[in-house]
Amino acid sequence: QVQLVESGGGLVQAGGSLRLSCAASGSIFSINAVDWYRQAPGKQRELVAGIKTGGITNYADSVKGRFTIFRNNTRNTVYLEMNSLKPEDTAVYYCNAQIRSVVGNYRDYWGQGTQVTVSS
């Protein structure tokens, strides 16, 4: 069984920084693309950043230059470094990963989410 767990959320003042972690565990054969999404109250879930196996990254325009996504393949973990945080970054952040288990094909997994709150 494969699990995806996010951590690192919290309360921070505007201009501050947080680092989110997305750790995959279980019977993992390989991990392909990993994406971070966020959902603010009353809004749709939106893609924040993504990273592919080869290290190619993409970012939403709203976070470019402030957020950095990177991965540690040895630890099956993807990080989202968030700097210069703004109140509008407040949301629940979710990790989504394409994972192939040792007994199956690639499928999408979601974590439970981690709350990020930025105060003004």
Image: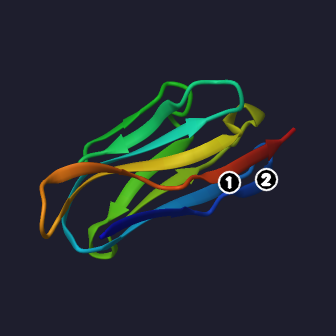
- Depth check, front residue: 53 or 102: 102
Instruction: State the residue position of label 1.
Output: 17
Figure check: 32 above or below 73: above
Q: Quadrant where the C terminus lies?
A: top right
- Give yes or no for contact between labels 1 and 2 (Cβ–Cβ under 8 Å): yes
Whether residue 61 is visible here, answered yes or no, is yes
Query: Which residue is depicted at the point 25% across and 47% down?
Result: 52
Taking the spot 39% from the left edge, 66% from the top edge, the residue there is 3
Q: Position of residue 22 (x, y in %)?
A: 45, 61
The residue located at (50%, 53%) in the rendering is 80
- The residue located at (36%, 42%) in the rendering is 50
Residue denoted by label 2 = 12
Q: Quadrant of the N terminus?
A: bottom left
Give the amino acid at mark 1: Ser
Q: Is residue 112 left or right of residue 89?
A: left
Q: Nearer the viewer, mark 1 or mark 2?
A: 2
